[in-house]
Image (cartoon, rainbow, N blue to C red):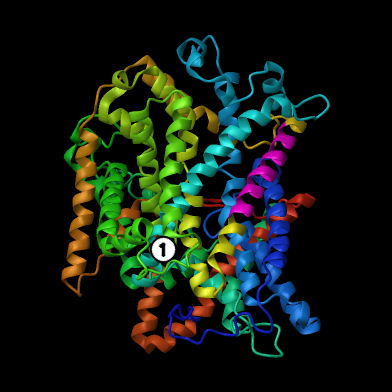
Amino acid sequence: MAKPESLSGAVDAPAGRAGAGRPASLWRAALVGAALVAVIGWLTPTVECFNWTVDITGPPPSIAATFFFFLVILANALLRRFRPRQAFVQGELALIMAMVLVGSPLASNVFTQFLLPNMVDPIYYASEANGWKTQFHRFLPAWMGPRDPKAIRDFFYGAPDGRVPWEAWIGPLLIWGGLMVAVGFVFFCISVLFRRQWVENERLAFPLLILPLELVREPEPGRGFNALLRNRLLWIGAAIPFICQLTNGLHKMYPSFPRLILLRYWLNALLPDPPWNGVGWWELSLYPFLVGIAYLLSAEVSFSCWFFYLMTKAQGVVGRSLGWGGLADGSVTERFPAIDGQSAGACIALVGMVAWSARSHLKRVFGKAFRGDPAVDDSDEPVSYRFALAGLILGSAFLLGWAWRAGLGLPAAAAFYAINLLWGFAISRMRAEAGILAAVPISPNKVMVDAVGTTVLGPQNLTAMAAMKWNTLDQSVLSDIGESLRIPFAARIRARQMALLIGLGCLLYMSISVGQALSLYYRYGAHHASADQWRVQSGLWAFQELSAWLTFSRKPEPAGFVYMAAGAGVLTFLGWMRLRFDWWPFHPVGYAIGNTLQYGWFSFFLGWLMKVVAVRAGGLRFYRAVLPFCFGLILGDMVGNGLWAVLSLAGVRGFAFNMGTWQ
């Protein structure tokens, strides 16, 4: 096994004192991890849905998970100083980290906060005006959500006694929860099959893991903090976002107090006239944690990310100058530049490229799975290759069966989940190289409608797809799963123990967050003034789209696939050039992910610039010397936001972070 990452992210540093003094205890890690998961699972809907609408489980890295895990690191430093025998060793901290980090988005939009409205909104909001009852209610199975009128009404207005009618909810929740578990399990199996290729053969950066892995490193004997936590640059970097948040929070509570906004400006205001207004909405903003993440990346990846985002703006200007539409639907010229279509094509090509580069590895994997090839060792994998392949097949069969019971024909179900898992795989690869979560380019529903039209699919298939769409909107947990398989390689813990704790953590996140969210909705009502209506009405989006498709049938739209083909071609060209020429500055992942950087492109530019200047000014040694400062930018941003979220429980309405807003 190769050596774990050092402070610089290189793999040639000493391993540190992993497991110093005694082996890692699974039970100690599980108990502490479960306690943290319970707190975050309870806190997330409390803060995001009602208390102070702020996304504490995003962006990656998770605000809540980072905040509470950092508290564990600090508490463990005290234990090392005063009760060293009770202190957690590196392996235990790594297990806790994996358990807490991976499943935290399940308490938010990935599961709880999108699922619950999706189960009741299409029933509650049906009216004579929209005609939903006659349009598609007969195609919705009764088990997809509560059907008791009182249970649904009390969800929106609050129950007189505040009691959750579990008899109406428990069955549908178990069925939907089974679907979520199956999707995660299938992707876990895919990740196992590719883990060695990504981690050991290609040695991908996994930038979001570098800081947590440095935090869990053992300190020198007699010290409470390791070298990173004793570095002054870490705390200087952390102070910048923390002070910025502090001034904004105090300004929120006391308007006369001056606030420090590092940077936020709308560049499109400077370009009101055509063709320059073709840039659309264009924000210049600074997020310290993104600067830190960009510094950790290879220069070609960080450069390509912000460069290709600017290219999307340039395409908008070109389209406006040519009189082309920039519409979501229509002909090729009406859609130009169809950035989402280009991103979808780039994702497809990226998956093909990744699979092709892994062909030798996959041949060995299949040899081990089918023939038990003794030359291939899978003992250090979370599960054996045979189990992973069988799990992939059986899990996929379960997904098809689930969709069939929901009313989706088998061919449509196969296409729906193939697209969904393809997006998840592509986004997981982007995150492994670029450290940020890319958006789903186009929903499976729209891809399929563009391909064959609404008439071929029919109302039954369209309704089932609408009901399942919420499960395809956020792929962060799938990215977390793929990323987590890097942890055992770096922290020298048992991969199978880690997989067990991650699974337990995910189940706890789902159950605790659902219980708390329903408790809040039935206590106060989803129509309460303090409830976040964006989340409450998220269950309407897919059904509003469905109603439009059922009202006005759509023919196949091949124009969308022209842009997908173009995106695939561009990414393939970029990948080919990168393989052929060392001087080629563009990375294909940057093109695939560029459209995601609406808020972060300038931060990525600054991180890239810092790295280039550091390397050219002082070489690798100076680059490593600056690393703690960039770690501090990430840590200060996440921990500061987590602190404000916790303070909101006491009625302190200070700084609230949402990407793209300063509240």
The residue closer to the viewer here, 589 or 33, is 33
Q: Residue furthest right?
A: 161
Please give the range of residues in magenta.
503-521
- Relative image position of residue 338 (x, y in whole percent): 27, 41
For this view, does 348 lie left or right of residue 7? left
Q: Main secondary structure of the magenta part?
A: helix
Q: In this figure, which residue is indicated by the disc labeled 1? A: 195
Element on which disc 1 rests: helix
Choose top left, top right, bottom left or bottom right for residue 82. Answer: bottom right
Report if residue 517 lies within the magenta region: yes
**Residue drawn at 65 percent across, 63 percent down:** 67
**Residue drawn at 41 percent across, 19 percent down:** 460
Q: Amino acid at mark 1?
A: Arg
- Relative image position of residue 68 (x, y in whole percent): 68, 62
**Residue drawn at 39 percent across, 18 percent down:** 459
For this view, does 513 lie left or right of residue 351? right
